[in-house]
Image (cartoon, rainbow, N blue to C red):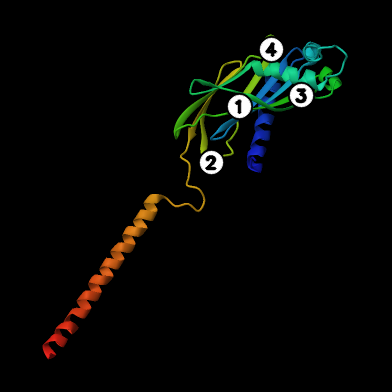
Amino acid sequence: MRSSRSSTIAGLTLVVALAAVSSSSAHRRDEYLQAARIAIDPDAVHLELDLTPGISVAGDVLAAIDADGNGTLARSEADAYVRQVLRGVTLAVDGRPIETRIAGSSFPPVEAVRQGEGAIRMRMTASLPELAAGAHHLQFANAHRPDIGVYLSNALVPASARVSITDQQRDVDQRTLDVTFFLHPARNRSGARSPLVDLSVVVAAVAVLWFARRVSATATGPDRSSRGARR
């Protein structure tokens, strides 16, 4: 589960991103806004994608989803569209593609989409290969509906203290995003001590015991000599 702090940051990131688009294009009626937010964990990448068609392209988008044209979006039609979007999304780490899977989706009412107010929300996830501590690159690309699409892409503040985002580079259309992140070494499990720590404790205990025996031998030596002389 993500922390409330990370959830708040994610929300603020979306607000800022949408505000930036509003100031430049006011989400024009003929555009299909696609906003991607990427969260990097030590072992996985989580992608949230919001797609909001403008009024003049809403009919085109709905036609691509509503395959039978009956004016309603069946679950099977929604799932088919999610898979279509997924085919246009790619993720790679250090130049190596990683498999992206659907984690969930939600579709607004058809009327909301027609009015340019409904956002289709998709959640995707991808497992990362085992990465060594150090700097790495995550590459994201979105090729869905470039004929009408406008794009946003941002990496969120990581929920894990092991991950630090150090740089984000986008192309001019924000269809691609290259995130440089640093993976910090994993800490020992709670309650577990390093073997080196255990070894140092043993060595220290042996040294203390040896020193105690030397002191004891020195202290008892004269008494033994005295007893021998009296005999």
If the image is split into quadrants, where does the N terminus sit?
top right
Q: Amino acid at mark 4?
A: Arg
Left or right: where 46 falls relative to 168 = right
- Position in image of residue 218 (x %, y %): 20, 76
Q: Amino acid at mark 2?
A: Ala
C-alpha span from label 2 to label 3: 32 Å
| Residue at image location 21% in from the left, 80% down from the top | 220
- Position in image of residue 56 (x %, y %): 80, 12
**Tag 3, which secondary structure?**
loop
C-alpha span from label 4 to label 2: 36 Å
Q: Which is nearer the N-term, disc 1 or disc 2? A: 1
- Position in image of residue 160 (x %, y %): 56, 39
Left or right: where 58 falls relative to 159 = right
C-alpha span from label 1 to label 2: 19 Å
Estimate how packed mark 2 is, as few (under 14), some (14 to 19) or many (20 or more) residues with alpha carbons within 10 Å.
few
Q: Amino acid at mark 3?
A: Ala
Left or right: where 116 falls relative to 6 = right
Q: Nearer the viewer, residue 231 or 50?
A: 231
Left or right: where 43 falls relative to 12 = left
Give me the disc on residue 119. Answer: 3
Q: Nearer the viewer, mark 1 or mark 4?
A: 4
Q: Which residue is mark 1?
A: 154
C-alpha span from label 4 to label 3: 15 Å
Q: Nearer the viewer, mark 1 or mark 2?
A: 2
Give me the disc on residue 161. Answer: 2
Give me the disc on residue 145. Answer: 4
Estimate how packed mark 4 is, as few (under 14), some (14 to 19) or many (20 or more) residues with alpha carbons within 10 Å.
few
- Position in image of residue 219 (x %, y %): 22, 78
